[in-house]
């Protein structure tokens, strides 16, 4: 028997691109909401990033949504959007402030159509002197201290995944759920606006406070020398057969357990974290050499038996093969065009809609369906499509260009 999600019966309108807003509505979709993704005639950006077709981002975070393709700069497209807002529960977007005003996607415009609407705008920056500026995930990383310590060949560099985009999506979901819980709440709850920059500040709070602490104790600001914790023996080490294990050693007890597990003597002069920090190079060499004497399987068993936190450092193509990912299964099969994908699910099953999710939509795949549900007749819909105010899906063209020499561009 399938379980309906906690947001079953709620309608969410998304005007999203790239990650932050689509990630937020992906979670709302998994919680049972109906998500209608409004896209411009050319489709949202992630539809065209890999060989002219959808990227992994699009497939992972847009499955199960409905695509309504409207030209919001056309009068008929705007009329359809307004009709949709009037019967929705949530509008969520990450348009730039200028584009949002130009297209009428503001709280004031939407609340005039539907006073109960919950409106969420994920911006580059929240209120302040930069609130009109555009910011993306790496810009927020640079502005909030994350990038300064993450360097490749000495050059400040972005992290791999777009974590601040995804954290912003999670914060948006929290805010939307809070507004939906407080029915009859004031505008302050229902008009949600915040930035990737503010998201980055909150995520960086530990490090920002840590610098202040060192200033108090040392008399000078001092950041960590790298993104890695400044604790010797804490990090990735290579095993005998060339696999990598990540080991966590935060405490003196962790150190003693590690030494027992890998069968090395726990020297008395390395008993405390302060001792080990003073002898960083020696500790690193000891751990590196000890790990290199083991194959990963035997080492993992020994570390587990000793209670040492660790895991293999896996490449992305191996992650979903791990027993923990498969038993019980923590991902769904996602068919798309002529291909099959496996996409991880929202990690709290008790809240999730367990009905099977559909594939990501083709651009405009549900345009006719949604417009008909808004009261448009078939002739009206045909006229809107003919005039370019709306676009319906084409299924006669391939989504991706064929491979040529391994080039994904």
Image: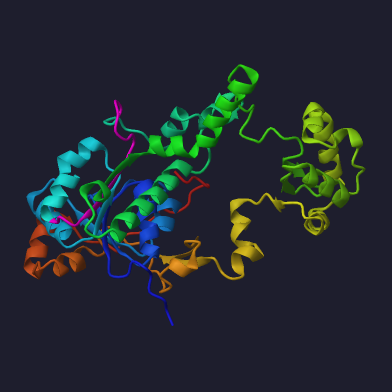
Against 212, residue 372 (above or below) is: below
x 62%, y 70%: residue = 327
Q: What residue span does the magenta drawing correspond to?
A: 114-130
Q: Nearer the viewer, residue 271 or 336?
A: 271
Q: Nearer the viewer, residue 223 or 156?
A: 223
The reply to whether residue 232 is in sight is yes
Measured from the top left, where is residue 220 in percent x and y?
60, 17
Occupied quadrant, residue 370: bottom left
Task: Describe residue 389's horizontal placement relative to residue 255 as left or right.
Answer: left
Residue at the outermost bottom position: 1
Measured from the top left, where is residue 108 in percent x and y?
15, 45
Q: Quadrant of the C terminus?
A: top left
Residue at the outermost top position: 219
Against 224, residue 247 (above or below) is: below
Magenta stretch, main secondary structure class: loop
- Magenta-drawn stretch contains 306: no
x 72%, y 51%: residue = 309
Against 247, residue 367 (above or below) is: below
Measured from the top left, where is residue 323 in percent x and y?
65, 65
Q: Quadrant of the N terminus?
A: bottom left
Occupied quadrant, residue 235: top right
Measured from the top left, where is residue 214 in percent x and y?
61, 24
Mark count: 0
- Magenta-drawn stretch contains 117: yes
Task: Describe residue 215's horizontal placement relative to residue 342 as left or right.
Answer: right
Q: How is the image coloured?
A: rainbow
The reply to whether residue 55 is in sight is no
x 77%, y 44%: residue = 238
Against 77, residue 157 (above or below) is: above
Q: Nearer the viewer, residue 27 or 266?
A: 266
């Amino acid at each position: 028997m399938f379980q309906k999600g906690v947001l079953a019966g709620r309608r969410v309108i998304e005007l999203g691109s790239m990650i932050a807003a689509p990630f937020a509505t992906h979670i709302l979709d998994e919680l049972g909401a109906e998500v209608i993704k409004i896209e411009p005639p050319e489709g949202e950006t992630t539809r065209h990033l890999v060989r002219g077709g959808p990227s992994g981002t699009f497939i992972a975070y847009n499955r199960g949504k409905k695509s309504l393709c409207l030209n919001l700069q056309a009068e008929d497209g705007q009329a359809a959007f307004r009709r949709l807002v009037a019967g929705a529960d949530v509008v969520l977007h990450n348009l730039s402030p200028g584009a949002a005003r130009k297209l009428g996607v503001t709280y004031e415009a939407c609340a005039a159509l539907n006073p109960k609407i919950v409106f969420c705008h994920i911006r580059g920056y929240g209120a302040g002197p930069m609130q009109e500026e555009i910011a993306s995930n790496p810009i927020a990383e640079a502005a909030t201290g994350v990038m300064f310590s993450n360097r490749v060949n000495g050059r400040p560099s972005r992290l791999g995944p777009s974590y601040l985009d995804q954290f912003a999506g999670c914060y948006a979901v929290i805010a939307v759920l809070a507004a939906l819980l407080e029915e009859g709440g004031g505008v302050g709850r229902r008009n949600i606006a915040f930035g990737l920059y503010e998201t980055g500040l909150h995520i960086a709070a530990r490090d920002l406070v840590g610098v202040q602490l060192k200033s108090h104790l040392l008399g000078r600001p001092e950041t960590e020398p790298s993104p890695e914790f400044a604790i010797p023996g804490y990090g990735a080490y290579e095993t005998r057969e060339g696999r990598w294990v990540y080991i966590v050693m935060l405490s003196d007890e962790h150190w003693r357990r590690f030494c027992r597990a890998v069968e090395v003597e726990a020297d008395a002069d390395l008993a405390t974290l302060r001792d080990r920090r003073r002898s960083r190079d020696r500790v690193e060499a000891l751990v590196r050499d000890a790990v290199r004497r083991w194959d990963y399987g035997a080492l993992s068993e020994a570390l587990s038996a000793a209670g040492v936190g660790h895991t293999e450092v896996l490449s992305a193509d191996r992650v979903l093969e791990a027993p923990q990912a498969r038993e019980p299964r923590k991902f769904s099969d996602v068919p798309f065009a002529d291909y099959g994908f496996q996409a991880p699910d929202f990690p709290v099953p008790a809240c999730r809609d367990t009905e099977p999710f559909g594939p990501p939509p083709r651009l405009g795949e549900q345009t006719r369906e949604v417009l008909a549900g808004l009261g448009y007749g078939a002739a009206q819909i045909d006229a809107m499509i003919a005039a370019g105010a709306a676009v319906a899906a084409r299924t006669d063209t391939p989504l991706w260009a064929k491979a040529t020499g391994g080039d994904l561009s």
